[in-house]
Every structure is written in C-alpha cells, then in structure tokens.
C-alpha cells in the first residue's frame, strides 16, 4: 500500500486542531480507501460472512470504511456497535448512522478510549479493527483481544 507523505509542517500548524480534523487532513492524501475496496472485493470472493449478525468496530473514527465493509461483506448484519475515542468523530458517525447508512441494522456509537471500554454487552460474531492496532500498545492489545474473546 502506498501512502502519500503529509508534510510535518502541516501537523505543526494543525497542533491546535482537533483529532477529527487532523485525521481528515491525513486522509486527503492517502489511498487506503482504494486499497480497502480492492481487498474487500478479494475477500468477498473467498469468504462467506453470511452468518455474521452482530459486529463491533473499534477505532472507527467517523466510520466510513467500516460502514463500507459491513455493507459489502456483512449482508445479514442486525447489530453494529462502533467504539471511538474522538468526540467529534463520534458525533459525525452518529449523524451518519441516524441517516440510515446501514438499513435494517441496529446501530450505536460509543465514545470511549478502547483501553477503558468494558467490552460488548453480549457476544458478537465479528470484530472490525481496520486501522487501529498500531495505536494500541502490545499489552493493551492483548487485554483487548482477551476482553473480546471472553464476552
């Protein structure tokens, strides 16, 4: 995957800007969405996710990629929970979910640092972590996976 370089000076200028706005700037210059679409097509041709009825998505930011993933690969989804730490991103995500971007799916967005999240209320069939694992320490990553597996 080729990601364009964002000039360091842009980050310095944006130091007083929210995480949501900073992330939006970074995403202007990357090709992750195109790469993800290609990967989704490949996965869709090889894996049957029709059994997945519930999904938790962690570190979603505003959820665009996770929503694309669920619409494309999880045709029988009934429940979708997004876990995101940034309040502005959660606000955008909730607004998108209220617009019905996942028709027939019960949706919610939780604003919490994943390390502080208590885990899903009930077991889920799938967990999406499309772009979050690099931001979690190995110790917290292990704890998160254990939490998800025991719920």
Image: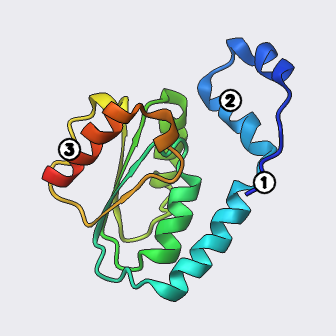
Q: Residues within 10 Å of mark 2 (few under 14, many from 20)?
A: few
Q: Within 10 Å of the Cα at label 1, are there few (<14), some (14-19), or many (20+) other Cα atoms?
A: few
Identify residue for label 2.
21
Q: Is residue 16 left or right of residue 105?
A: right
- Disc nearer the start of the sequence (2/3): 2
Residue drawn 49% across the image and 46% down it: 60
Question: Is residue 87 positioned above or below 33 on the image?
Answer: above
Task: Kindly check if marks 2 and 3 are in contact, taking CB atoms under 8 A apart as contact.
Answer: no
Report which quarter residue 52 is drawn in. Answer: bottom left
Q: Secondary structure at mark 1?
A: loop
- Residue beneath label 1, please? 2
Q: Secondary structure at mark 2?
A: helix
Q: Earlier in the sequence, mark 3 or mark 1?
A: 1
The spot of residue 69 in percent (x, y) is 52, 66
For disc 3, the neighbor class at 10 Å (few under 14, some 14 to 19, many from 20) is some
| Foreground: disc 1 or disc 2 | 1
Residue at which label 3 appears? 147
Where residue 134 is drawn, which disc sits there? none
Direction from residue 131 to residue 84 in the image, left or right: left
Q: Nearer the viewer, residue 9 or 18?
A: 9
Q: Is residue 115 above or below residue 120?
A: above
Residue at 59 percent across and 80 percent down: it is 42
Residue 110 point in image, percent of width and height: 35, 39
Per the model, the C-alpha gap separating discs 2 and 3 is 30 Å
């Amino acid at each position: 995957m080729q990601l364009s370089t964002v000039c360091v000076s842009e980050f310095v200028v944006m130091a007083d800007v929210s995480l949501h706005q900073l992330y939006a700037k970074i995403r202007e210059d990357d090709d992750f969405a195109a790469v993800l679409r290609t990967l989704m097509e490949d996965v869709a041709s090889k894996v049957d996710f029709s059994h997945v009825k519930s999904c938790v998505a962690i570190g979603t930011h505003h959820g665009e990629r996770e929503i694309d993933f669920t619409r494309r690969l999880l045709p029988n989804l009934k429940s979708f929970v997004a876990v995101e730490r940034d309040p502005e991103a959660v606000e955008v995500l909730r607004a998108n979910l209220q617009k019905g971007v996942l028709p027939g799916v019960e949706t919610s967005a939780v604003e919490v640092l994943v390390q502080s999240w208590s885990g899903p209320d009930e077991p889920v069939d799938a967990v999406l972590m499309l772009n979050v694992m690099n931001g979690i320490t190995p110790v917290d990553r292990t704890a998160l996976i254990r939490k998800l597996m025991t719920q």
